[in-house]
Amino acid sequence: MAAAQEALMLERTPRRLRDLIDQWGSGDFSSIPEIVLLSAADMNGAMGAYVISTGKIYLNKDWLLTAGSDAVGAVLIEELGHHLDGMVNDADTSGDEGEVLRS
């Protein structure tokens, strides 16, 4: 919880974030955003992206063919950080909250 608070620049943990952490802690991952695979061309070469308007994480399926599990995990954590930011903050947190969450 502390990592999410720091990454999202929160003074306190909002109820919605606490609920998510409790869900995930009990093995309920139904609130994880849908993951959509797109071509490298459609991703403009990016490995991953989160789009708040769709609530989905997009991954580069061409990159996934050669990416190691650590790299895939890092991208997923980073994009999940962007998703959490969109859920608990009215405006995008300055900086790269996904990267902060990952570190």
Image (cartoon, rainbow, N blue to C red):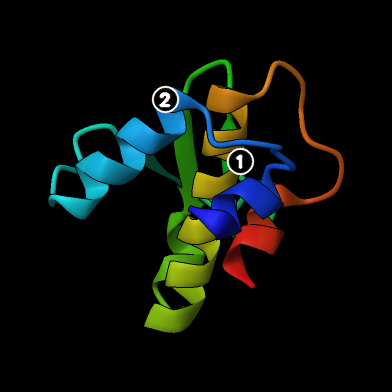
Say which of 49 and 26 sits in front.
26
Where residue 95 sits: x, y (%)?
85, 48
Amino acid at circle 2: Arg
Name above or below for residue 71 compared with residue 30. below
Alpha-carbon neighbours of circle 2 within 10 Å: few (<14), some, or many (≥20)?
Answer: few
> What amino acid is found at the position of numbered circle 1 in the picture?
His
Q: Where residue 18 sits: x, y (%)?
A: 39, 36
Element at badge 1?
helix
Residue 17 numbered mark, or none: none
Assess whether mark 2 and mark 1 are in contact (beta carbons under 8 angstroms). no
What residue is rendered at 22% in x and 40% in y?
Answer: 23
Relative horizontal placement of residue 97, taking residue 62 as reference (left or right): right
Classify mark 1: residues with Cα within 10 Å, few (<14), some (14-19) or many (20+). many
Q: Residue at x 53, y 36 (%)?
A: 84
Point out the image quarter for the C terminus.
bottom right
- Dot 2 lies on which element? helix
Question: Splitting the image into 4 quarters, where does residue 40 fall?
Answer: bottom right
Identify which residue, 55 or 25, lies in the foreground. 25
- For the residue pair 60 and 51, the one nearer the viewer reads as 51
**Residue at left 58%, top 59%?**
3
Q: Quadrant of residue 8?
A: top right
Residue reaching furthest to the left: 27
Up/down of 41 relative to 63, above or below: above
Percent across and percent down for residue 89 are 66, 23
Mark 1 or mark 2: which is in front?
Answer: 2
Checking the image for residue 16, the label placed there is: 2
Residue 1: give x, y in percent of width and height: 48, 53
Where is mark 1, residue-wise?
Answer: 82
